[in-house]
């Protein structure tokens, strides 16, 4: 729940008539509600091997990470390495620069997620622009990550 799955599921319902498909990939502690398990705009993938992860990043248009509590969120870096725009929350590491390489949600809600995704459907060129601005993950090597974590643990 702390990764924002309830809000994602709310967004799927708000966007059920839009040309948007949600892929839920990875370990989940929840069982899909019956009404959502068969929803046409959701694909419940479940856990995948590390060797399969790249395929999902490669096929995606955007990475949705509306976490409530995540110290850093390495999956953001993975998504950016695949040139994926990221939609995230303020509750994780500062990888996404709002309006530059993705969006940082003002609040974590299904309505906020739906609003951003509708905007991207109406302006698909934004995805290409965000992809071009993906961060250089080289700046997040072991030394840089250690420095980042030291900075945040010392209160900046």
Image (cartoon, rainbow, N blue to C red):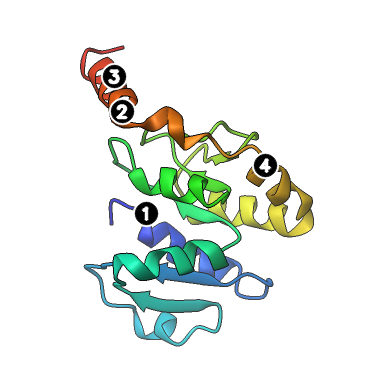
Bin the neighbour count of mark 1 within 10 Å (Cα to Cα): few under 14, some 14-19, many 20 and up.
many
Secondary structure under badge 1? loop
Would you name the residue on which mark 4 appears?
132
The vertical placement of 152 against 51, above or below, is: above
Cβ atoms under marks 3 and 4 closer than 8 Å? no
Instruction: Where is residue 26? Give x, y as percent.
Output: 32, 67
- Tell me, yes or no, whether the two marked residues, 2 and 4, touch with CB atoms within 8 Å: no
Mark 3 vs mark 1, CA separation in Å:
28 Å
Residue 133, x across and y down, in percent: 64, 37
Front in this rendered view, residue 101 or 90:
101
Mark linked to residue 4: 1
Query: Would you place residue 151 above or below residue 138 in this image?
Result: above
Picture residue at 36% right of the left edge, 86% below the top: 34
Q: Would you say residue 92 is visible in this rendering?
A: yes
Numbered mark located on residue 145 in the image: 2
Q: Are marks 4 and 1 in contact (CB under 8 Å)?
A: no
For the residues carrying marks 2 and 1, which lies nearer the camera in this image?
2
Q: Which residue is mark 3?
A: 147
**Is 124 placed above or below 148 here?**
below
Residue at the spot 52% in from the left edge and 36% down from the top edge: 106
């Amino acid at each position: 729940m702390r990764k924002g799955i309830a809000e994602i599921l709310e967004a799927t319902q708000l966007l059920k008539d839009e040309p948007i498909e949600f892929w839920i990939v990875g370990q989940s502690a929840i069982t899909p509600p019956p009404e959502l398990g068969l929803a046409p705009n959701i694909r419940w993938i479940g856990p995948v091997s590390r060797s399969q992860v790249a395929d999902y990043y490669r096929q995606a248009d955007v990475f949705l990470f509306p976490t409530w509590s995540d110290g850093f969120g390495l999956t953001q870096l993975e998504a950016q390495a695949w040139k994926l725009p990221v939609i995230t929350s303020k509750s994780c590491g500062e990888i996404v620069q709002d309006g530059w390489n993705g969006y940082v949600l003002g609040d974590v809600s299904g309505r906020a997620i739906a609003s951003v995704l509708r905007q991207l459907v109406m302006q698909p060129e934004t995805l290409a622009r965000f992809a071009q601005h993906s961060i250089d993950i080289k700046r997040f090597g072991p030394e840089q990550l250690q420095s980042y974590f030291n900075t945040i643990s010392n209160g900046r």
